[in-house]
Amino acid sequence: MKIEILGTGCAKCKTLYENARKAVEESGKAAEIVKVEDIPSIMKYGVMSTPALVVDGQVKFSGKLASVAEIINML
């Protein structure tokens, strides 16, 4: 599973990255977590509001700081 955190490096983006890391750890699933900070790559997903969370190429959250529990439920 590949999880991408889309955002330009703001505090919310960093928090979402940590929440995703904790969710993967707590769920026991194997996943690669990647930060995507360049605008052209973010726009490729059609995301207009960050932070955003992408799982295996599908945008799951955008413009929202998802909690660890929300991410675990989505995984």
Image (cartoon, rainbow, N blue to C red):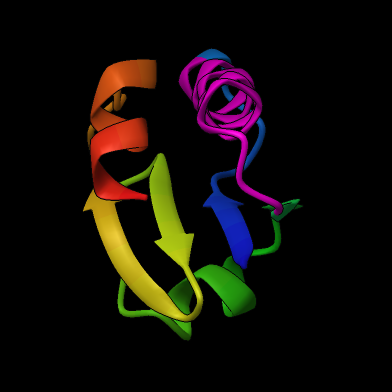
Task: Tell me what residue is drawn at x 24 percent, y 37 percent.
Answer: 73
Side of 9 relative to 70 (left or right):
right
Figure quadrant of residue 39: bottom right
| Vertical arrangement, residue 64 with respect to residue 56, above or below | above
Q: Find residue 53 and report its horizontal and vertical position in percent.
A: 42, 51
Residue range highlighted in magenta: 12-30
Q: Find residue 48 and report its horizontal and vertical position in percent.
A: 27, 61
Q: Find residue 51 and report its horizontal and vertical position in percent.
A: 41, 39
Figure quadrant of residue 70: top left
Q: Find residue 40 and report its horizontal and vertical position in percent.
A: 60, 78
Q: Is residue 48 visible?
A: no
The stretch drawn in magenta includes residue 13? yes
Quadrant for the N terminus, please.
bottom right
Task: Tell me what residue is drawn at x 31 percent, y 67 percent.
Answer: 59
| Vertical arrangement, residue 19 with respect to residue 38, above or below | above
| Vertical arrangement, residue 19 with respect to residue 5, above or below | above
The stretch drawn in magenta includes residue 70? no
